[in-house]
Image: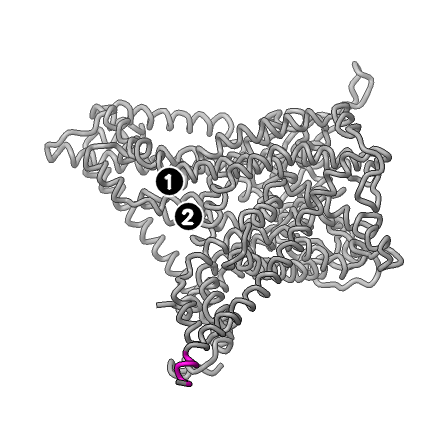
Amino acid sequence: MSQAKLLDNKPARHHMGLRTSRLIGNSAIYAFLIIISIIWLIPFVCIVLQSFRVENTHQVGYIIPKKWGFDNYVNLFQTDFPRWYMNTFISALVTAALQTVIVLCMSYTLSRFRFKLRKPLMRLMLILGMFPGMLTMIILYRVLKDLGMTQANSVPGLILVYVASSGMGYYVSKGFFDTIPKSLDEAARVDGATRFQVLKKIILPLSKPIVIYTILTAFMGPWGDFVFARYIAFGTSAGMNVAVGLYNWLNKDQISKCYTMFCAGGVLVAVPVTVLFMCLQRYYVEGVTGGAVKG
Amino acid sequence: MKQYTDLEYLKLSRGQKLLYKIASFFCSIPQKIKGLFVGLWNLIKNAGKAIGSEAADIWTTFRDGDWKTKLSFFIMGFGNLARGQILRGLLFLLFEVVFIGYMVIAGGYWLSMLPSLGKVGPTEEYNLIYDAYVTTYNDNSFKILLYGVLTIFFIIAFIYTWRVNVKQNKMAEKILKSGKQLRSGKEDLRSLVDDQFHKTLLALPLTGIIVFTVLPIVFMILVAFTNYDGTHDGYYNNLFTWVGLDNFNTMLSWKVGTGAGTQSYAATFGEVLSWTLIWAFFATFTNYFLGMFVAMAINKRGINLKKLWRTILVLTIAIPQFISLLYVSKMFAKNGIVNGFLMSMGWIDQALPFWEDPTWARITVILINIWIGIPYLMLITTGILMNIPQDLYESARIDGANAWQQYTKITLPYMLFVTGPYLLTSFTGNMNNFNVIYLLTGGAPTNPAASSAAGTVGYTDLLITWLFKITTGAESQYYLASVVGILVFIVVALISLVVYNVLPSIKNEEDFQ
């Protein structure tokens, strides 16, 4: 009898213990998640609050503004900010379109075709990737200057630089194409489709996630580019993008005048990009995850 | 070093195995170097053989070929035209005409100037009409170097095309002899969207890479052997010229300075390099483990609102880095919000030197980098964690393994197995992580002892930000920047090589089957 009782009780007690321990564990995790959420959100909350602060324009040690208003946003339009914004927006748009075509051409070819130079080509691009890209900036600047694509006309120059070498970033989308079964291609080829028709009618319809991922990352790149944009604008305000222009506002001699305006500009830049990103987040996650596993 | 037999090796613990792998890798370096030279020698030998056989093939093609083939040796595409392949023939012919035209008009000049990089710099002459000294600009070293390299590229392309032309003649003769038909121009065009489709697809991306990556890199490597800088810009003030290995000598000569700005480049380079490696190590692994931890916390069974937590974290990816990083950098400034908050709470009396003290600055950038990096790792590891077969955990629980044991015996090995290559790319990526360092600190605080000629060097400067400072600094020492660039390449390549040699063995060990 005692044995039967033991058998009866033990699972029950075990169950209870598991439940309480899981409850404690889970509340600890909730506490952890809430704390890191706060840490992650604080800078963004601060930047939004500061952009509405109108009692002064320099940096202060408190978060909540004493006087609220839209002055910083209004003042933005008296500066070159709209110009920077347009520069960035146009280059992001064009880059997204062209870069997507180039990256997809490259990755599709490397994934699907077997030709003599395929392996050497991939190795070459791996080695080229180990050189600091910044070095090429010096020569590209001088060449673009000769072509008249610097300073005030920096937008076409920037687009050219962003797009031209983008074929090297083929890894993620090649990983995606590798997962589409080759038997699909072969079946279509047997039915007499050309390679081009295979790409157009079979592969592209299946590639929506990776196309969106490529467009999204290509579009976001120019918003964050600082190095090339600064070098190519070379101090000419009309040729700057938002990153370069706003960076200059935080210089030692400007920060006391422009700090809150920087915050307002930052909000105006971040909101559309963030909304777009959040809408397409699913595709981004798929791309990032796939890319990392493939290496 | 002591060599273990297979049996002895298997008895070692995991840590010892790894150490043994690394030690044996380094002990095998002399062997490897020897292997490298043997490989190089074989390469030269094979290349020689290949050239020999090519030459023989060209000769027999010429000897045995008909008059159409023979004439094609001088007029490219003639054979194609004579045999009815109009499109191909015209393309070959056009290429030859363009090449010869280019060489006569410009290429010959650039090539002849390449050894000297220009002879006459800008000259000043008194001009009576303007009543002033007028400068005439003459040779342009920059253009000579650039177009010289371009011309060499063009010559190589021409030789290759010429060889293809010869080959095609041989093939065409063979095909016609066997009684078959040659491809028409229409079929050629059709093949570009069919069995030659890869050439069509690659044409644009590869042109871009060659012109905007390969050419600039070759150019910048060559710059390391010149004295190209702000005072020798090759056109407006002084010409620049070849200086051999002088720049490498300057860069690598060791002299530890005592006064301000007297430290030699080599010592500065050593300091910056060691911080770069420390930074890359911490930036990679703190993110990796903390990101994995956060992902596991969110994925844990019984945790609700998974999507909300992820979305909050992902904000740092969505918002352009220059905004978030610049803002965070100002938050930690002396009069920033963080210090303001701590002081208003009465926890500190005076501002903490987040960006002023070398050690504080270094720790702060690593901590802020965690803020930037965790979301990426969270996304990546979430996907992989879900792929771990759940029955592994089930059986581990039945065997009585606790959470920590499950983590170290199942989760971690699996993660390392899958993400090994990613860790390597992320390490080298962090070594060149320009944005985080430049936007957060700009390299500050400045290291006063570091050589002043190379631009101000700070305690948080990575090699890549230092390189940027050298090129944009007052003296614009491009030659020095390109030496640093070459050294960065060597370091990155070496690390990749070492890790790839150790990595596969780790992989096999952690095999799950």
Asked whether residue B165 appears in the rendered view, the answer is no
**Residue B478 within the segment the image draws in magenta:** no
Q: CA distance from mark 2 to mark 1?
A: 13 Å
Subunit of label 1: A
Residue displayed at 42% across by 43% down: A173
Q: Which residue is mark 2?
A: A122
Depicted B459 relative to depicted A100: above or below:
below
The residue nearer to you, when weighing B20 against B32, is: B20
Bin the neighbour count of mark 1 within 10 Å (Cα to Cα): few under 14, some 14-19, many 20 and up: many
N-terminal-most mark, 2 or 1: 1
The amino acid type, in three-letter code, at marker 1 is Tyr
Q: Give the side of residue B400 with respect to residue B377, left or right.
A: left
Label 1: which secondary element: helix
Magenta segment range? Answer: A2-7
Q: Residue furthest left?
A: B179
Residue A116 shows in the view: yes
Quadrant of the rendered structure where residue B132 is?
top right
Q: Specify the color scheme.
A: one colour
Does A54 sit above or below residue B474? above
Question: Image check: B218 left or right of B45?
Answer: right
Q: Which residue is mark 1?
A: A108
Please state the horizontal and vertical placement of residue A6, each as a whole percent of the image.
43, 81
Q: Chain of mark 2?
A: A
- Residue name at image x 40 percent, y 34 percent: B203
